[in-house]
Amino acid sequence: MQTQITTIAGKEVRDALRTHLLSLLTGFLVIAALVSLTVSAIALHVDYLTYVESRALLISLGKSAAELAPPAFFPLKLLRGFVEHVEIIGGVLGIVLGYRAAAVERGHSTLALIMTRPLTQTAFLSGKVGGNMMLIMAGLATTFVVGAIALAAISGLGLAPSDLARIFVVFTAASFYVGIFFLLGFILALTIKKLPTALLVAFAIWLSLVLIAPQIGDTMDPDNQVAGGVFHALDIAKPQQTEILKSFKTYETIRDGIEQTSPAKHFERFSFAVLGIKDIYNGQPLAEVIRDRVTDLWWLLAIFAALVFVLFLRPLNLTRLTKEQ
Amino acid sequence: MAFAIKMDKLTKRYDDFVALDSVSLEIERGEIFGFLGHNGAGKTTTINILTTLLEPTSGKASVCGHDVVTESMMARMHIGYVPENVRLYDSMSAKDNLLFFARLSGVVNPLQRIDETLTILDCSELRDKKVGAMSKGLRQRIGLAQAILHRPDVLFLDEPTSGLDPLGIKTLRDLITKLNRELGMTIFMNTHLISEVSKTCTSIAVLNHGKLAYHDTIAGVLARFGDDKTLEDLYLSLTPAQAA
Amino acid sequence: MTSRQLTLLETTWLSARSSIRIGIKDNTVVLLAGLFFAMVLISAYLGWSATATVNAIYTKALPVLQAQGKAIPANPVGETSPLSLFRNMVTYVALLGALASLVLGHQVVAADRKSGVIPILFSRPINRTGFAIGKISAIIFAIVGILIAAGLVNALTMLVLPGLSLSGAVWIGLIKFYAVSGLYMVAFGLLGAICASTLSTESMALLIPVTIWLALTFIVPQITANIGPMAALNPQSANLIAPTGGFFAVTSTLLGPFSIAESYRYLASSILEITSGAGTTTTALGSLTVLAVANLALAGAFIFSFKTLDACRSDYRD
């Protein structure tokens, strides 16, 4: 059985390397990530220049520049857009790989040829999942390595071992996150009669979970309805903010509940915490951050496990799995 | 009167590959013409040129006196075409598919014409059935129906019996003969089924690696090669590379 | 022989009719359009509840501010137009509307290619330009239909919700918003159709336009105005002041004409009165021009790609 699994997994890897799909999407993700890093660094540089000009102006006017806060520079914070691109484009990568893993068999009617061999469904699916998870991790590893090198080059500071450890933790979470969408695409392409329909249903679900649910959550956040934040606009200090928000507990629970349905939001919250992008976690020890955000990690693992369960438990209906006429 | 189809040194090249090599042929009106050849001989390329879907590299071809390149629009008014493995719109009924193509061809009273055509092809019962739910043989008949709605002078059939069972093949053969006899259509049929050619066609040509290897009437073939030789013997002798 | 060559108008009309029929029967188009409608319904509630929440926060903040002896600022949502209730529609048009249109455009061509009728169609005496224009008309017609229905839902919402002052300007604003949204969606419909005509596999014909959509929606705004991918989904991003400096000035000049997502967001947000436009270099006329030119260019590109479709290899390879 092990040989069968590795044979199938090896074929998946070779097939994917031969097609343009994987390289197109990984390339796109790498470009998006680099663009994000570069633009963030440039924007930070612009902020810094603005600070220097403002400081010089104050001093030239004989005023104190002590209250003027310089822009803080934490290299890992530049990865905010990078993480968001992994959220969005990584999901598409997963769906495409999942769709391809099923479509390549259905399209060439090879599924029937394979399943009439002395091969269990478990072995077949294990090979498919194993091979494609290797591809996902390779694609993400490429993206993260390029991102880390670019970050070190842009910041000019180099990355400490603790920074690299944080990046590795986020890479691991990203692998499960993208794996969720791979499983989704794979299950749908094995289930739905018409392959293009399966691809589009997968995209519709991706859209709902990655973009719409978080957007609804953001919209329901009153702080996002006013430019600069409602409390900032009303000049309300933090302690009073907390007091006022107590009256909106139900509303906030519903809002948070909608966001919880989104694996993208869990991945984002976890990653932002680990990388110190969210201010309250900036500078905190990694182990403590992971402990604090372990629920998000459990969500990702649970969704992944649930989809694996669904995939392996459903028997394949070979007569149904023919390419559309 | 102009030939139904005329090819004069027709050549088609794709980079270094010569799909058709200086093919010259004349097909009289009213013939059922069988175009034989091995897979990849250039039969479909020939049909694609004659139906104005592809331009030749050199040479000329005409249908009912109209050059397929310089007078393509006029040529199209005289042709009907059934591609290999025709599928049509799965989600639409036969009637709706045919109505669309009838209107595209400018047929007057399209609904009446559709009913007449389905009657000729003995498939009136398929009128309101979805094409996607039909078997290959029935779909082929509807494919034939769309090609003759406008009563073309020349009907092009690309491997019409491909994938059909023996009964389906016989039915199609009878329909082709009927269209020729009752509607006077010239039929140009690509095939590699020699048995069908001998039962249906009035003349044949054999293509071998893009070159015209032989062209004659069926009577001429039999006269030349004698009663003890079959059409299959002729074909195999003309395409030795394939026979090996 | 009873075949005749149809006029350009006849060909266009026939092509449009059949394409509309195919498009609206397709499950995936129906699914995405259905999802779009669901969000149209939800958007009104979301807009209303977010505004109501800010109003409630303001009411609760008043005694706090008074107790601290601070000046009482104006309610940040007090003077907003009823149209701002639909601010989330900007996001849903950019996401679902664009994706549904892309799939519709794809289907209008892919259905012909997959059903093997391209050789039959092209061997008929039809004007291929007219046929392509018919397909464009089908895309426009279907999108207009979806948006009219969505607009009616929004109009009904405004009539039903209490406390809204509905002037003629508000109704005109709603029509303008949907007109601009239509322009944006049609562009993606045309993109889907171009890729469906040009590419040899159906999966690529879907993936390439989706990739372009991702780039326009999430990457280009970051390059031109440092708007992060998730921030780009917030309609308030139209209020974000673009960073100054050489890099962003250059990128926004170079990429601005191609950034239909930003042009749409700016125009739509202006019409719905959720942006003041301060701090941006974009103008309404500029944005409208970008959308109009994009549509014309894409329409021309589609006509060309359809006419030059190789009828001998029109089936998709997958």
Image (tube, coloured by chain):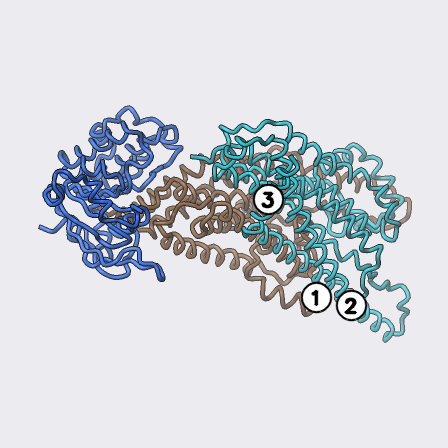
Chain colours: A cyan, B blue, C brown
- The answer to whether the residue labelled 2 contacts the one labelled 1, judged by CB atoms less than 8 Å apart, is yes
Residue C155 visible in rendering: no
Which residue is tagged 1? C244
From the viewer's perspective, is C241 left or right of B45?
Answer: right
Indicate the position of residue A148 as horizontal and vertical percent values. Answer: 74, 58
Indicate the position of residue A99 as horizontal and vertical percent values. Answer: 56, 41
Q: Please state which of residues A73 and A102 is positioned toward the viewer in this rendering.
A: A102
Q: Please state which of residues C299 and A246 is positioned toward the viewer in this rendering.
A: C299
From the viewer's perspective, is B162 left or right of A178?
Answer: left
Which residue is tagged 2? A50
Indicate the position of residue B211 as horizontal and vertical percent values. Answer: 24, 55
Compute the Cα span from label 3 to label 1: 40 Å
Quarter of the rendering containing residue B108: top left
Q: Amino acid at mark 1?
A: Thr
Which residue is tagged 3? A97
Residue C38 visible in rendering: yes
Q: Of the residues tagged 3 and 1, which is closer to the observer? A: 3
Check chain identity for marks 3 and 2: say if they share one.
yes
State which chain disc 1 sits on: C
Q: Residue at the far top: name it.
A: B125
Q: Is residue A310 above or below residue C249?
A: above
State which chain disc 2 sits on: A
Q: Amino acid at mark 3?
A: Leu
Q: Which mark is residue B186?
A: none
Compute the Cα span from label 3 to label 2: 45 Å
* Nearest to N terminus: mark 3 or mark 2: 2
Compute the Cα span from label 2 to label 1: 9 Å
What residue appears at the point 64 percent right and 58 percent down from the top-left corner? A31
For label 1, the crowd category at 10 Å Cα-Cα, with few meaning under 14, some 14 to 19 and many 20 or more, is: some
Q: Of the residues tagged 3 and 2, which is closer to the observer? A: 3
Callout 2 secondary element = helix
